[in-house]
Structures are given as C-alpha cells and as structure tokens.
Image: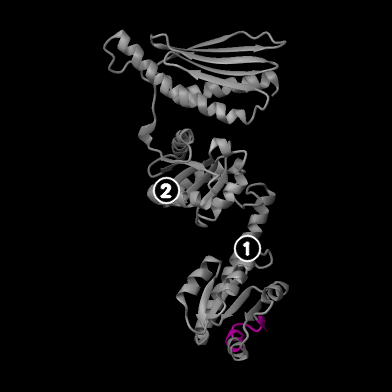
C-alpha cells in the first residue's frame, strides 16, 4: 500500500535529516517537504496518511490552527500528525494534544525512534480507515446514525444489553429539560456529549428525546464528573437532566428501568442529575402499619398523591409538545387525581380515586364526537398497584385518545 508522508518545515537541513530517517521505512512510501506558509491548503491537496509538523518554538497559534482544521477536514481526519520539536515544550504539547495531535518526536531522535513512531502512526491510520469503512456500512444499514456515528433508536437497547453481559459499568439516560426541548435537537445534544466522553463509551438515541450512554468499567462517581462536564459545555439556555446507575450484579432491564425513573424525577426538579438505587423501587402498600381506618385512609391518600402528581405533570409536559391543538389539564388532590385531554373532536378523562378501602378506582371516560364509547372502570388492589402500572394505564389512555381523535 502506497503512503504519502508530508513534512511541514521551513528548515532545509531538518527536511533532509527527517527524509533520510523516514525513507528507511519502505521504498513504497513517498515523502514530500513543504513550508509552513499555506501548509494546510497544500497538505489538503496531497492527502497524506502521515504529517510531520516541525515546530520552531515560535508560532504556536499557527500549529493549533492547522491541527484544528485537519481534524475537521474529511480528507485528513484519518491522517496522523507527529509534532517535531527542536526543543521540547510541554505546554505546546498539551495544547496540541487537545487539538488532535497523534504523537511527538525531537528532531534529534534516533532512526529507531523515527521508525517505531512512524510505523505506529501508519498502523493507527489503517485501523482508523478500517473503522470508517465499517461505520459507512453500519450507517447504510441504519444501525448507526450517519451524522453522529452513534447507535440509532432501533438498536441502542440491544447493543447496550449485550455489552452489559460482558462488562460492568454505569448506565446513564440523558434528556434535555422539558421546557427547552423545542430549542435543542437530540442530534445537537449528542454532539456535545460525544465531545466529552471516551471513544470506548457507547452512545445511542432512545425515545422521547432521551440519549442512552454506557460507561464501561466506570463508577457512578466518575460518571457524575462527566455529566457535569457535559453540562458546562452547553450554553446556559440549554439545561439537561440525567438518571444513572452502576450495573454491578444488576440486569440491564432493571438498570434501564431504574435509570429512567431517576431521570423522570430529575426532570421534575429540572437541571439535575439523580443516581438511581435499586431500593428506590416503590410499590403502593396502603395497609402497612395501619392501626385504624382514618389513619389508613389519610396515609394511603398521601402515598397515592405522591405518585400521581409527578406522573401526571410529566405526562402533561411531554404530550403538550405532541398534541398542538389539544388542551391538557391535570389536577391532583389527596382524594382524587384527574388527567384530561380536550380538543374540537371531544374530551377524555383519566380519573384515579381512593375511597378508603383496599381498592384503587380508575375511571376512563372518552366523550368523542360520532363515537359511542362506554366508560371503563378498573378496580386495582392497593397491594398490587405500582408506579409502573399507573404509568402504563395512563399512556394507554393517551394512545386511545390519539387514535379516536386522529391527532
């Protein structure tokens, strides 16, 4: 395979010295030396696989500008860049690394050092090229997103579940705050996330503006640091929330459920991150430690209200963006919860009440024009009622309204 190697330098002696060392590698490799002036435009024409950039300890800005342009140019994004120092400068090296530098050498380095570093960069480029080819194939199959190169909504869950079988890690669900979802797209948020995570971390789109992340062999504490870094990279107008949980000794389905519940609580607070714990799973048990009927009723009503209130609020905020011509109202008291959808085609109500016995009453009423629909009444045992079951019933009710009114 033919490889083009470019040296950027204004020093002829350096050019001859480096050329002599580099061409010891393989006769099939071509070597070109160009000056710093208009170097980016010339390099772009040559399309090399390896670039040596000779830094003369004077123009750091030009170096950083070159690296940034190269990393953002399609023809050069798989090329490796080795920085050549006459005198080593640690500060310049760190700044250059942040802009995409691959490696560095001193101009007085031995031929062996040049050989090893150069061959390593050529090998890295081949791997990078192969990865890009695979990404193109996966993009065509719609397994990964063609712009962000992360998993699409249809494959994210499957990929992360398989990954969780092989490694422990921390699973996180990120979503923009409900009130700013019209201002930031999932793709824009994904781009910001990608800039702040490792290449070994797994990312993918999910439903309802959510983004799933898998941090391989990373503790929840360290993931929180990453989440804070992502938040800082966004402007103040764009706020995000997240639910996250470590997956040691935990099935992925359970981790996904708990992380999503934590995210729901975070969205109610706004601009916050919540660590999920398995013990957070709650079920409504209205008969624990009840000594008399009055105390039983008051305690049960409070527990029911604490579940219904955030559930109705979140459902309202999410669906207001979907149903533009539908009025959504919700009201919750200690005795009853009402969630109502209304437009020109009709009105539907989802009512949850607790009369003070061992059953929860759920009444679903659809009053839609040109449809004869009977009210549906459900009586759910308090010991079997869970937040998940209520959420399922509410979402089913909303889907029925949408089907009846075609909104």
Q: Residue 404 sits in which quadrant? A: top right
Q: Which mark is residue 224?
A: 2
How far apart are the two marked residues, 1 and 2, measured between alpha carbons? 33 Å
Q: Residue 305 sits in which quadrant? A: top left
Instruction: Say whether residue 30 is magenta.
Output: yes
Is residue 16 visible in this depiction of the protein?
Answer: yes
The magenta segment is 19-35
Q: Residue at x 54, y 74 (%)?
A: 120
Q: Which mark is residue 130?
A: 1
Q: Residue at x 56, y 36 (%)?
A: 179
Note whether 344 is above or below 14 in the view shown. Answer: above
User: Mark 1 or mark 2, which is nearer to you?
Assistant: 2
Q: Which mark is residue 45?
A: none
The scheme the figure's colours follow is one colour
Counting labels gives 2
In the rendered structure, the answer to whether residue 330 lies left or right of residue 132 reads: left
Is residue 152 visible in this depiction of the protein?
Answer: no
Crowding at label 1, few (<14), some or many (≥20) Cα neighbours within 10 Å? Answer: few
Numbered disc 2: secondary structure: helix
Give how far across and how far down residue 330 sits, in percent.
53, 20
Give how far across and how far down residue 222 sits, in percent.
40, 52
Q: Residue at x 62, y 71 (%)?
A: 66
Closer to the camera in the image, 319 or 384: 319
Instruction: Say whether residue 328 is magenta.
Output: no
Note whether 373 is above or below 175 in the view shown. Answer: above
């Amino acid at each position: 395979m033919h490889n083009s190697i470019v040296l950027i330098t204004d020093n002829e002696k350096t050019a001859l010295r480096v050329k002599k060392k580099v061409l010891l590698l393989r006769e099939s490799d071509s070597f070109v030396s160009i000056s710093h002036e208009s170097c980016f435009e010339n390099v772009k024409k040559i399309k090399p696989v390896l670039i040596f950039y000779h830094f003369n300890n004077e123009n750091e800005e030009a170096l950083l500008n070159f690296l940034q342009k190269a990393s953002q140019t399609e023809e050069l994004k798989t090329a490796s860049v080795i920085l050549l120092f006459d005198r080593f400068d640690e500060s310049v090296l760190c700044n250059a690394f942040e802009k995409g530098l691959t490696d560095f050498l001193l101009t007085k380095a031995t031929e062996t050092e040049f050989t090893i570093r150069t061959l390593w960069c050529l090998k890295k480029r081949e791997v990078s090229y192969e990865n890009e080819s695979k990404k193109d194939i996966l993009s065509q199959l719609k397994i990964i997103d063609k712009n962000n190169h992360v998993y699409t909504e249809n494959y994210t869950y499957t990929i992360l579940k398989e990954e969780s079988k092989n490694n422990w890690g921390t699973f996180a669900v990120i979503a923009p705050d409900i009130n700013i979802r019209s201002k930031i797209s999932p793709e824009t948020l994904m781009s910001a996330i990608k800039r702040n995570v490792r290449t070994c971390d797994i990312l993918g789109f999910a439903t309802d503006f959510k983004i799933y992340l898998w941090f391989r062999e990373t503790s929840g504490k360290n993931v929180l640091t990453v989440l804070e870094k992502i938040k800082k990279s966004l402007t103040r107008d764009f706020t995000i929330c997240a639910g996250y949980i470590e997956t040691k000794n935990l099935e992925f389905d359970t981790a996904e459920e708990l992380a999503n519940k934590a995210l729901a609580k975070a969205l109610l607070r706004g601009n916050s991150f919540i660590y999920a714990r398995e013990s957070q799973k709650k079920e409504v048990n209205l008969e624990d430690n009840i000594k008399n009927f009055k105390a039983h009723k008051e305690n049960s009503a409070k527990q029911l209200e604490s579940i219904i209130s955030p559930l109705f609020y979140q459902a309202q905020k999410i669906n207001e963006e979907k149903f533009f011509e539908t009025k959504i109202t919700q009201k919750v008291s200690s005795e009853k919860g009402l969630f109502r959808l209304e437009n020109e085609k009709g009105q539907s109500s989802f009512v949850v009440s607790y009369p003070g016995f061992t059953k929860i009453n759920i009444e679903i009423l659809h009053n839609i024009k040109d449809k004869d629909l009977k009210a549906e009444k459900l009586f759910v045992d308090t010991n079997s009622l869970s937040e998940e079951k209520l959420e399922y019933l509410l979402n089913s009710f909303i889907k029925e309204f949408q089907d009846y009114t075609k909104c």
